[in-house]
Amino acid sequence: MKKFLILFLAMSLFTACSDDDDSGAEGNIVGTWTLVAATNVPGFTIDDCTGRSTITFNADNTASSTFYATVEDQCVSSNDSGTWSNSSGSQYTIKIPGFDDPVAGTVNFSNENRFTFTPNDLPTSSLTFARN
């Protein structure tokens, strides 16, 4: 179960970007972001290790992430990459290599340096990112 949660979180890190958001009230998602909060994600908290997790959204609709987790008392990282798109409005979708179905969710910018992603399949859970 813990591996599934980490995998879900890593997938969620990729969801939420679009070059359509490069300006305006919604914010500019292109850049590198750090995971700063996780709400209602079972068995997961932000600590000194997981708080180092980052995602980089590129203007060419590609993304890459480095996710940190504590495994056997060691802080270890894993890297991943994928593609993303803006489905409509604040809805974003990502196709992660190795998965059949894309992950979709809502992105809400609180300001130009912070956004929260809520997966459509887990509407009570969310991840918050701050711009590096």
Image (tube, grey):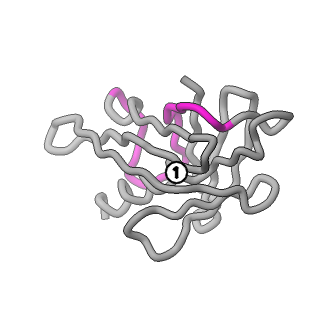
Highlighted magenta segment, given as a residue range:
29-48
Q: Count of labels shown?
A: 1
Q: In which quarter of the image is the N terminus?
A: bottom left
Identify whether 8 is placed above or below 71. Answer: below
Residue that protrudes farthest toward the top in the picture: 132
Question: In the rendered structure, does residue 39 fall within the stretch colored magenta?
Answer: yes
Give left or right: position of 56 versus 108.
Answer: left
- Rate crowding at label 1 as few (under 14), some (14 to 19) or many (20 or more) other CA atoms within 10 Å: many
Q: Quadrant of the C terminus?
A: top right
Quickly name the residue at label 1.
14
Identify the element where label 1 is drawn: helix
Give left or right: position of 19 versus 10.
Answer: right
- Tell me what residue is drawn at x 23 percent, y 35 percent: 75
Residue that protrudes farthest toward the bottom in the picture: 100
Image location (x, y in percent) of residue 99: 42, 71
User: Amino acid type of disc 1?
Assistant: Phe
Q: Which of 20 and 130 is in front in this view?
A: 20
- Tell me what residue is drawn at x 51 percent, y 46 percent: 63
Residue that protrudes farthest toward the front in the picture: 60
Image location (x, y in percent) of residue 112: 73, 28
Q: Nearer the viewer, residue 90 or 22?
A: 22
Image location (x, y in percent) of residue 57: 56, 41
Give left or right: position of 101 versus 19.
Answer: left
Question: In the rendered structure, does residue 41 fall within the stretch colored magenta?
Answer: yes
Identify whether 12 is placed above or below 34. Answer: below
Question: Which quarter of the figure has residue 27?
Answer: top right
Residue that protrudes farthest toward the right in the picture: 25
